[in-house]
Image (tube, rainbow, N blue to C red):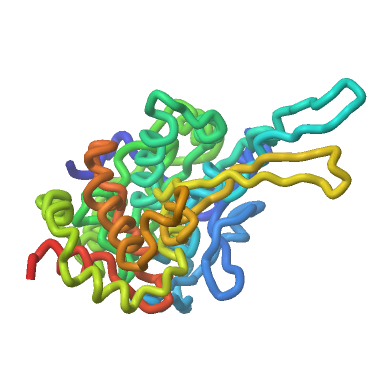
């Protein structure tokens, strides 16, 4: 599929984008969650408007390496996948579920889940949209719906940005999850820097309504062509690739491949890959009680298949070795996830490669096992 028809696209200048964010925050009542610079990285947190976006900042990513750099232009979205995904906003790392208090009437439980916030997610990349679509199927599309996730997802406004600057660890193009987003957003921007402007695609009725409240002209054919060139440039400059066609079957057929021992010797078992992954959804329950003994609570917290306790049953862990735990993680993402949900559990964002302290590369490890050597 190519670019949307020109008549479906609008054009915003930089002040127009600022106005759009103001409409979302001040008129529509959304809390803006967007990219900003903190502690030497681009992270997602509450922003007040366009002035908080990382103007003129890019990044350099490689296995086990992340650095910011000056771009020398006015780009606000001139970076690749940031340190965080938008998973924490839709699937919080810790969610209080229930509190139980001892009263004169006995034990009284109450729902402890906080009110669902109205969030506008700003700068969502195509790979991130693909990840949200994956978690939609996992957490909201089956017989057992995660009601908190479903409510947060329904309340969110998504302002996507088409990718123009992939990193050295990105491989979304080979998985068909980027660099262009075609669905799953309310509005999608393609940023052009000379002069600075944004081609806007409407993806929903809410998006059309919000865009109608700011001055947005029609995108000229030259703007549409420039926007298409941005995306195609990103497609041509992916840092990595992964061929998914026969991968699930080959990984499933080689559980004793020697490469599992090799990668286990390098893996630290830290779980960074699962924490930064936008599709990992494993959790555990934590019970707590007050010292006085008159109140207790239960919370759902993120977990990781790299911990020994994750697979603990009576008598010990099912996966006592790093070899077994790494194999479980990689084969779930790239093989058994397909059996469960009909698609890969990986969207090619590259975060697991960038944020691995020892630079383990999922694409290299998967290809080595699948190659059968």
Instruction: Please name whichever residue, 190 or 95, is drawn nearer the observer in this view of the structure.
Output: 95
Q: Quadrant of residue 371?
A: bottom left
How far across and down, in percent of the image, does residue 153 sit?
50, 34
Extreme top residue here? 105
Q: Quadrant of residue 165?
A: bottom left
Q: Residue at x 63, y 46 (%)?
A: 286
- Which image quarter is the C terminus in? bottom left
Extreme right residue here? 104
91 relative position to 228: left or right: right
Residue 202: in sight, yes or no? no
How far across and down, in percent of the image, does residue 155 sit?
55, 32
- Which image quarter is the N terminus in? top left
Number of numbered markers: 0
Q: Quadrant of residue 287?
A: top right
Q: Residue at x 46, y 28 (%)?
A: 145
How far across and down, in percent of the image, does residue 198 sit?
42, 51
Asked if 362 appears above or below 173 in the picture, the reply is below
Q: Residue at x 51, y 40 (%)?
A: 215
Asked if 85 appears above or below 183 in the picture, the reply is below
237 relative position to 205: left or right: left
Residue 191: in sight, yes or no? yes
Extreme front residue here? 315
Q: Residue at x 48, y 64 (%)?
A: 83
How far across and down, in percent of the image, does residue 21 sit?
58, 46
Instruction: Please name whichever residue, 316 or 292, is drawn nearer the observer in this view of the structure.
Output: 316
């Amino acid at each position: 599929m190519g670019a949307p028809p020109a008549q479906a696209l609008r054009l915003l200048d930089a002040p127009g984008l600022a106005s759009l964010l103001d409409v979302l925050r001040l008129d529509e009542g959304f809390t803006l969650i967007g990219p900003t610079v903190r502690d030497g990285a681009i992270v997602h947190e509450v922003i007040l408007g366009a002035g908080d976006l990382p103007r003129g900042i890019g990044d350099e990513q490689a296995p086990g390496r992340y650095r910011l750099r000056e771009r020398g232009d006015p780009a606000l979205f001139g970076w690749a996948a940031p340190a965080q995904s938008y998973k924490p906003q839709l699937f919080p790392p810790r969610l209080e579920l229930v509190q139980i208090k001892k009263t004169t009437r006995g034990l009284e439980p109450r729902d402890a889940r906080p009110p669902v916030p109205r969030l506008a997610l700003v700068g969502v990349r195509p790979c991130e949209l693909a990840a949200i679509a994956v978690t939609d199927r996992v957490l909201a599309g089956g017989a057992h719906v995660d009601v908190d996730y479903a409510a947060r997802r329904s309340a969110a406004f998504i302002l996507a940005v088409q990718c123009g600057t992939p990193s050295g660890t990105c491989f979304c193009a080979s998985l068909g999850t980027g660099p262009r987003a075609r669905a799953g957003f309310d509005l999608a921007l393609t940023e052009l820097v000379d002069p600075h402007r944004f081609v806007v695609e409407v993806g929903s009725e809410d998006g059309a309504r919000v865009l109608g409240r700011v001055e947005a002209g029609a995108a000229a054919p030259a703007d549409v062509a420039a926007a298409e060139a941005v995306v195609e440039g990103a497609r041509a400059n992916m840092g990595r690739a992964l061929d998914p066609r026969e991968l699930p079957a080959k990984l499933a057929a080689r559980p004793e491949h020697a490469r599992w021992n090799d990668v286990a010797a390098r893996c630290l078992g830290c779980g960074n890959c699962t924490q930064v992954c936008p599709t990992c959804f494993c959790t555990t329950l934590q019970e707590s009680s007050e010292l006085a003994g008159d109140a207790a609570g239960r919370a759902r917290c993120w977990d990781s298949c790299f911990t020994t306790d994750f697979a603990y049953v009576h008598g010990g862990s099912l996966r006592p070795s790093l070899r077994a735990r790494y194999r479980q993680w990689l084969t779930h993402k790239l093989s058994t996830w397909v059996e469960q949900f009909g698609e890969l559990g990986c969207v090619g964002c590259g975060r697991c490669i960038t944020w691995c302290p020892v630079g383990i590369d999922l694409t290299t490890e998967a290809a080595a096992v699948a190659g059968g050597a």
